[in-house]
Amino acid sequence: MLPHMKLGLNLRTGVDRILTSWKSRDDPGAGQYSYRVEPSGSPQLVLYNGSVRVYIDNQDEVSTVYTLINNSIASTKFVDESGSLQMVSWLGRWVGFYSVPEDRCDSYRRCGVYGYCDSNNGREFECTCLPGYEPRSTDEWYLQDASGGCVKKRQALAMCGNGDGFVKVAKAKMPDTSKALVWKSLSMQECKEKCLRNCSCTAYVVGGRGICITWYGNLIDVRRFPDGGQDLYVRVNAIELGRSF
């Protein structure tokens, strides 16, 4: 993929532009990995191994274009035969600028539902449950297996309309947005109230330009970054509200 080329779905024509890996370094036939824009919910970029999600990069558009500050430098994006999305530039030789998935937290659903991944948490195990949740299986969690994810804490089961609110998870990657709803021109308070009024709403994020994103049901593929990311507000009951996170 070269600068100024589009990746994603043309809603008028139905043309879906995707990146596909080669079969191997020597065979340019279509490989098993693909990188595409998934337009449902709040659009996001997804790296697939066949039909299995490997990595998600949340976006706000149904297509994406990348540009360069210095157009004299030859650069390209591609998915290699091992399923790594890379960007390289020619500086006398091809030099890599980034490659994803980069660490274990880039793996889709690494910490299951209602879990989040933090490779910089200072512990051997990078998975933690979101506020108001606990491991589905403490035995599996002890063995550093988070595939079962997390469930609501027992005292948090009936939390709608009983003094519930939201706890901020800072520097977060947004959960999988394929089932999220996007609202425009809402303030922080309006976004919070919209989520609070619906007992099925589990979290919200307020982005730039008044964009409000709300989630209904499971929160999947959350991680925390050392820097950057979004403030994710997770719904909790009154017991959890006073806790800092």
Image: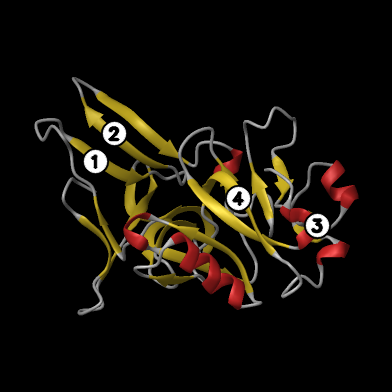
N-terminal label among 3 and 2: 2
Residue 128 in view of the camera: yes
**Depth-wise, is mark 3 or mark 2 nearer the camera?**
3
Label 4 amino acid? Lys
Q: Residues within 10 Å of mark 4 (few under 14, many from 20)?
A: many
Quarter holding the C terminus is: top right
Label 1 amino acid? Thr
Q: What whole-number distance in Å separates the C-alpha atoms at marks 4 and 1?
A: 37 Å
For residue 4, above or below residue 212: above
Q: Are marks 1 and 3 in contact (CB under 8 Å)?
A: no
Q: What whole-number distance in Å separates the C-alpha atoms at marks 2 and 4?
A: 36 Å
- Left or right of 47 on screen, residue 89: left
**Depth-wise, is mark 2 or mark 4 nearer the camera?**
4
State the mark number for residue 88. 2
N-terminal label among 1 and 2: 1
State the mark number for residue 122. none
Q: Secondary structure at mark 2?
A: strand
Q: Secondary structure at mark 4?
A: strand
How was this image coloured? secondary structure
N-terminal label among 2 and 4: 2
Q: Position of residue 219 (x, y in %)?
A: 62, 62
Q: Are marks 1 and 2 in contact (CB under 8 Å)?
A: yes
N-terminal label among 1 and 3: 1
Q: What whole-number distance in Å separates the C-alpha atoms at marks 1 and 2?
A: 6 Å
**Depth-wise, is mark 3 or mark 4 nearer the camera?**
3
Q: Are marks 4 and 1 in contact (CB under 8 Å)?
A: no
Q: Secondary structure at mark 3?
A: helix
Q: Residue at x 62, y 54 (%)?
A: 109
For residue 195, above or below residue 84: below
- Left or right of 146 on screen, residue 9: left
Residue matched to label 4: 168
Q: Position of residue 194 (x, y in %)?
A: 52, 73
